[in-house]
Image: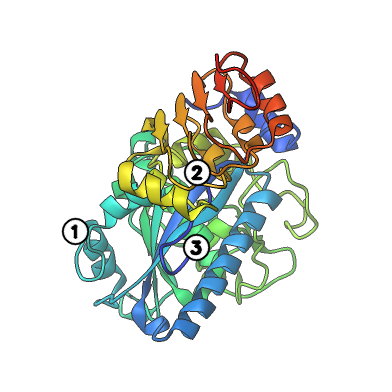
Amino acid sequence: MKLRRSAGLLLHAFAVLALILAFASRAVAEDVTIGIRFVVSDDLGKSATQQHVILEKLESYVAELNGYYRNSKVVLHAEIVDVEFSRIEAVDVMQILDDMAHEQNGFDVMFKKADEFGADYTVAMTSQLMIHGKPGCGRAYAVNQSVEAIASTRKAFAAVNFVCGAHTLAHELGHLMGLNHGTLVDFCHPKMGHTSAINPYANGYAVGNCDGKPQSGEFGDIMVGGHMREIIGNGKASLPIFSNPRIRDQRCGINSTCGDVAIGDAARTLNENAHYYAAHEEPDVHTLHYDSAELFACIRKKYRDKEIAELEELVCPNADISNVADLEKLRALRHIDLSGNRLEDVGLLGQLPPERIERIDLRGNDRLSCPSLDDLVRRFPGKVVSPIRCSASP
């Protein structure tokens, strides 16, 4: 699972059917976290104040996105892992996507940074976006149609017009996750591949006709997208969920059913593939937030470019560290040497997996409260080397 982290100076396999049904009930499953890295056109943030406003707005978009997942009974949870303001040269969406693919014109070393920050998806946020010569809201690099594609960092990016917000973000990420517009859009705009999704049921769902006029009982979900206006009029009947026939809602047409098992069950697809969406990248340990500046300094100096899953040994003795908060995120650790520091409480180390830990050296931490060691010693028997004044070292 990805972990929330700072954004530098700016913002610090398939599951079986039984598991899917458990996901739908939300009773036993834990959300799968996906990391999003935003590259924002610098004309949106010309000053520190403007950048702060943009960052707050991006946070609100991601919060709305998580609301869509939650209301759709989808086990995904999105988090921002980095925000970078950059000069984005193009306004045509296809040129922007090409620039992203080739890491040019505002997207230098994009994939390396995705790897560094653990970004599963990279989204360009622009102040203007042209699609087929007209202002538009967004475009994904592709509708990914295989497990290999949905798990590939190099096929996991999109461009979005900043003013279009969370709905467009959710829609374009949906394409990258293998979802498409659906059968009604395909009926109204044939031979344009609107159902070429990863699964036959991985589509948006809508009820209506193609006259472009709003009528009672018509609706469409997130993946119908901008085609709402073309198919059922002004688009105001758009329901901010992904198709899920298990959801009953009075806004979902005459039958109050928000999907179709055969052709419109995007939520099932998202749940089946959740771990693939989160498998693109793991963050490097130096990109995480640590409460202790001294701990961060040691990690940045000695373990830069190490991913969480790679870091098995942490050696930071005599580094003036007084706080171990956030060290519990490094869940691959086996050996920890924090001897000779200024630690007073090490309770959070108890959150590390007991089956992995082999040794925790805390000698020389003269400020350490001996009673605070009790739980740690019980959790890792024979593996904790305590200060001499607390107990004899094993």
Find disc 3 in the rendering and name its residue: 169
How far is disc 2 from disc 1 in space, using C-alphas? 26 Å
Query: The disc labelled 2 sits on which kind of residue?
Result: Lys
Query: The disc labelled 3 sits on which kind of residue?
Result: Leu
Residue placed at 38% from the left, 42% from the top? 281
- Of the numbered discs 3 and 1, the one sitting upstream in the chain is 1
Find disc 2 in the rendering and name its residue: 2
Where is residue 286? Give x, y as percent.
39, 48
In the foreground, 390 or 110: 390
The answer, for residue 241, to whether it is visible in the render is no
Find disc 1 in the rendering and name its residue: 102
Q: Closer to the observer: label 2 or label 1?
A: 2
**Mark 2–mark 1 contact, CB under 8 Å?**
no
Q: Would residue 378 appear left or right of 334 to someone viewing this image?
A: right
Residue placed at 60% from the left, 68% from the top? 60
Residue placed at 53% from the left, 51% from the top? 4
